[in-house]
Amino acid sequence: MTKEIQQWATRNKIHLIGWFLYIICEIVLIGFAAGRFGKPIAYLLHYSLNIILFYSNTFLVLKNGFSKRKWRIAIITSYLILEITLFIALKISIDAILIGHQSGVKLFSFVDLPYLLQNLWRGLLFIGLSCYYFMFLRYKKERMEKEQSQKQEHEGYKRNKELEIALHESTNAYLKAQINPHFIFNTLGFIHDSVLRTDAQAAQAVIDLSELMRFAVNSGHTDQDPFLLEEIQQVESLIRLYKVRFKERVFVEFTHSTAASESRLIPLILLTLVENLFKHGDIHKRDDPAKIAITTNDGILKIYTYNLKKEGKTPRGFHNGMANISTRLEYNYPNRFKMQYGEINGKHFFVEITLSTHVET
């Protein structure tokens, strides 16, 4: 209990010091001016009533009154009249208790017009001071809210600029990586024609590789996001390539709904996830195949990958790849996506991306 009182006193020390100085100064000045001082009990009761009036006007009358939108002035005026009436009534009651024990003095005989005007002025004084205090609190609150809003706006602007810079750097790095793509496509076409007569499967692999590279090079050159069907077809090509490479010892369950394939998504998100699955996952267990699922429900597009982990530590750069995907999604779909990834039972790894396809206008 003592600790709680100390904490309360620490929080309100400015109020306590202010009231102490005000009361001491007023008692001393009025006491010397009148040539006499009152009893301690009288000071205690009167100043307690003044303090109660001050804070009740601030946190009850004004706070509740300003919270009303209709009839605000009428409500606050009614509260103030009721408040000042109650204050004068309590003041009269306190004075009646203090002087009631004196012999030869009639009860309430001290109540006259000057007495009422004096206490009316006293009550209005503390109500006025309370109004200034209330306006200060409102100003302080509005200023803090404005500063918080400006801070959030600044942080949002700063974050958007960082995303723009990161995307610009990624774009530059991507463009530097495009070393004469037409030459590469022509070379792949020559290889396809050369192996077609001897190995049809290898020729198909060259076509799949060529289409994958063409999709990667041309992605991002359209005015709007491509349909997910285009990238789904490239994922199927990528799976065929890995099956050729590992002589069909690749076990991946790839499912996607028609509605999902008609959704739009920035390019290379799905391909990057699938490439990571092949690179870092164990895809050679028939009884524990990797899974890629794309679904949509109630305007929510969901991409889910699941795979058995390769033995050993997670390679460097893996989490950077996940962070890059998240950065691209955040830049293109702010506050519309959610990305989760992690281990399951220490043996498997999953990635789940959910994206709202509804655009708020």
Image (tube, grey):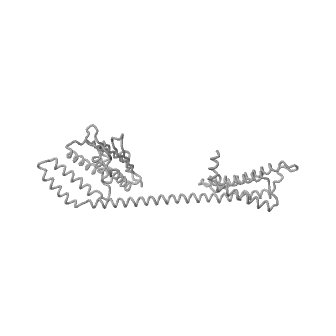
Residue at the right extreme, as displayed: 104
Image quarter of residue 112 = bottom right
Residue at the top extreme, as displayed: 287
Residue 229 x, y percent position in the rendering: 28, 49
Image quarter of residue 22 = bottom right
Count of numbered tags? 0
Q: Is residue 353 left or right of residue 97?
A: left
Residue 344 x, y percent position in the rendering: 36, 41
Q: Is residue 128 left or right of residue 325?
A: right
Residue at the front extreme, as displayed: 312
Q: Image quadrant for the N terminus? A: top right
The foreground one among 200 and 262 is 200
The foreground one among 108 and 158 is 158
| Residue shown at the point (78%, 60%) measured from the top left | 30
Q: Image quadrant for the C terminus? A: bottom left
Residue 56 x, y percent position in the rendering: 67, 52
The foreground one among 31 and 118 is 31
Q: Is residue 299 visible?
A: no
Residue 338 x, y percent position in the rendering: 39, 49
The foreground one among 20 and 64 is 20
Q: Is residue 176 visible?
A: yes
| Residue shown at the point (70%, 58%) measured from the top left | 21
